[in-house]
Amino acid sequence: MDLNFFRDYNQLLAKTLEETNYETVAVLAKRLQSNWKSGNQVFLCGNGGSAANAIHLANDLIYGVDKKKGIGLRVNALPSNQAVNTCLANDEGYDSIFSLQLKVLGNQGDTLIVFSGSGNSPNIVKAIETAKEMGIESYAVLGFSGGKAKELADHALHYAINNMQIAEDLQQIVGHMLMRWLSLNNPN
């Protein structure tokens, strides 16, 4: 077995993290803290592995930040309800599954966080556009070129990495950084 593959993967992940400008992460952390204090909601979305990361972060923000009952943030992972997603995909088109949920559930002052490798998924782009229309501040954690989402989001954390697995690893790492920071800076 060639162990160099595993070392190379680790080195690429570490190098990407080392070169990260964490200002956008800090801005998002403060925004989430503000949402926590005000009771505004946080919406998360992504496709495939990014959807799983969105659902995982929702869990961490609802329960993991403070394990006292009822203390976490008000969070909705938009990919998590399969009945809603399959209904909207069937009736309205897959590109609308997140934006239509956001229109029903969201309010001005809420926050949208999108996870995307490419930043070009039509449902991600449409969710950011809907957030703009509604006065919902948007954040994007992106890989590859950052795509359309990089330009549309209010704040983009862009990792110029052409590797989907590393891009998804970075989403999870950023999510865990946010969760840990919030658990140490609980506004309640």
Image (cartoon, rainbow, N blue to C red):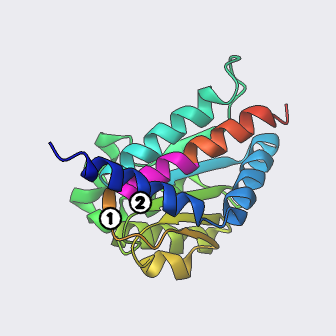
Camera-side mark, 1 or 2? 2
Q: Nearer the viewer, residue 3 or 182?
A: 3
Residue 119's image quarter? bottom left
- For the point 44% across and 81% down, the residue is 148
Residue assigned mark 2: 12
Q: Residue at x 50, y 63 (%)?
A: 16
Q: Is residue 45 visible?
A: no
Q: Position of residue 102 (x, y in %)?
A: 51, 57
Answer left or right for 25 relative to 45.
right
Residue hosting label 1: 163
- Residue 67 position by quadrant: top right
Direction from residue 90 to residue 169 in the image, left or right = right
**Dot 1 and dot 2 residues touching (CB under 8 Å):** yes
**Spot occupied by residue 94 in the image (x, y as percentages of width and height):** 28, 63
Give the secondary structure at mark 1.
loop
Question: Could you tell me residue 185's position as x and y percent?
Answer: 81, 37
Task: Identify the residue at image location x=40%, y=54%.
Answer: 168
Q: Is residue 115 visible?
A: yes
Which residue type carries mark 1? Answer: Asn
Amino acid at dot 2 = Leu
Residues rendered magenta in the picture: 166-174
